[in-house]
Image (cartoon, rainbow, N blue to C red):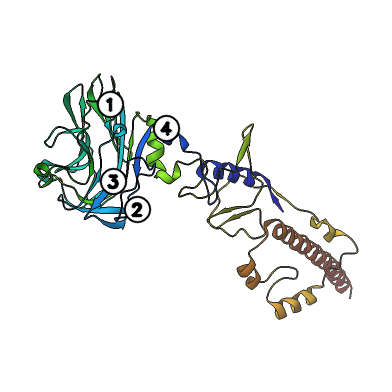
Amino acid sequence: MKVLNLVLGISLLVLHLGVKGQTTDHSNFLNGLVSAYSLESSTSLDDELNTNNGTITGATTVSGNIGNALNFTGSQATMATIPTSTSLDIDGTEITMMVDIYPTANGQSGKSVIVQKGWGSTGDNVYSISYTNTNTIRYRNYIDGVRRDFMGTTTAPLNTWSRIICVWKSGEPRTIRINTATDVEGISFTGTHTVNSGRDVTIGSYDVASPAGTRSFTGNIDNVMIWNRALTTAEQNTLINNNLGFSDFSSSGSGTGSGTTIWSEDNSVASYSGKVGIGTTIPGSYELAVNGEIRAKEIKVETANWPDYVFDKEYPLQSLSQLQEFIKENGHLPNIPSAKIIETDGQNLGEMNRLLLEKIEELTIYILQLKNQYDEQQVQINSLKNKSKYE
């Protein structure tokens, strides 16, 4: 059996949504990526690019938005530190910061730092994302030596994972994304980031004692990433809608989706040379196996041996008495699979349609036979009635 229209529709769906074994190329996110921290372990702070590795103090490993995350308890005793470096200065005219947070308490003293690059000798930041005591996000940038704070209005609720993406590009309004919601600043700033090469980048708290005691984050943090460019709105949507992590950025398909991009497309026709499983990893002998429901406007099934043979004079049609005896012994019609077989093996749509039509055509013959018997009996009855009138 070949399911033509359905296979094409499912193939296109698989191409765009991705099923087990297939991924989409997200390697564009490697462009401009300075550092990425998946925070899978509490023993070492590993930059996925192996450029700016750091250290972890006190934070413990917990279940994250993707894989594991780190838990911070709201003090400098639990934090991660990345030593200052030229690449982390971000001294250009664009920056994007992303982080996943699961806050378990409101921001301390108004604002708790989630991730920051320090400025001067106090709590100032070259760039930072902070969580406020009203569950919103503050995004800070030092632009041409002036501290610029953008206070968002969308909330990142307690005890829930939220993906935060903050973007600044010179001459354009800054944006704060919290999942699918976007806060846009009412003004824009033109200039460059002011560099301070003497302070580290920290996660969960400050690298200086004074603000750390009162402005540290309480909750879980995952997937910290910094780009030296402004991600487009479409790129932000992709990161949020697909919940991507660093492992998804590789075009070789080594990410959480696992597999490689093995679909090809030509003139709007998607093709793949192997078997497809949706909701299952075991398609068996089938080209397409779906563990779930399918909705379609039309399904075309090609099958052979259509049962017009029932009307052939040589067709071995059982008598009604034979049919009655078969049903009494087997509990189903001849040539029709039993309920036990269907429950175990399922049903072949093409073959079942053929068998059902076979039974309909047999039923038609039985009806015609009964009609002929009825007509003959009616003739005999009328003959007897007429004869009785003259006796």
Crowdedness near tag 4: few (<14), some (14–19) or many (≥20) residues, C-alpha within 10 Å: few
Q: Residue 31 carries which label?
A: 4
**Distance between the alpha carbons at the discs numbered 3 and 1:** 21 Å
Q: Which mark is residue 54?
A: 3
Residue 161 spot, x, y in % from top left: 29, 49
- The amino acid at mark 3 is Gly
Residue 239 spot, x, y in % from top left: 39, 39
Looking at the image, tell me whether mark 1 or mark 4 is earlier in sequence order.
4
Asked if 36 appears above or below 173 in the picture, the reply is: below
Crowdedness near tag 1: few (<14), some (14–19) or many (≥20) residues, C-alpha within 10 Å: some
- The amino acid at mark 2 is Glu
Looking at the image, tell me whether mark 3 or mark 2 is earlier in sequence order.
2
Q: Residue 40 carries which label?
A: 2
Q: Residue 91 carries which label?
A: 1
Looking at the image, tell me whether mark 3 or mark 1 is earlier in sequence order.
3
Element assignment for label 3: loop
Query: Which quarter of the rendered picture does the N terminus lie within?
Result: bottom right
Residue 261 spot, x, y in % from top left: 56, 43
- The amino acid at mark 4 is Asn
Marks 3/4 in contact by CB < 8 Å: the verdict is: no
Element assignment for label 1: loop
Nearest the viewer among 341 and 214 is 214
Q: Is residue 348 left or right of residue 114?
A: right
Asked if 215 appears above or below 351 in the picture, the reply is: above
- Can the viewer see residue 244? no
Looking at the image, tell me whether mark 4 or mark 2 is earlier in sequence order.
4
Nearer to us of marks 3 and 1 is: 3
Residue 173 placement: quadrant = top left
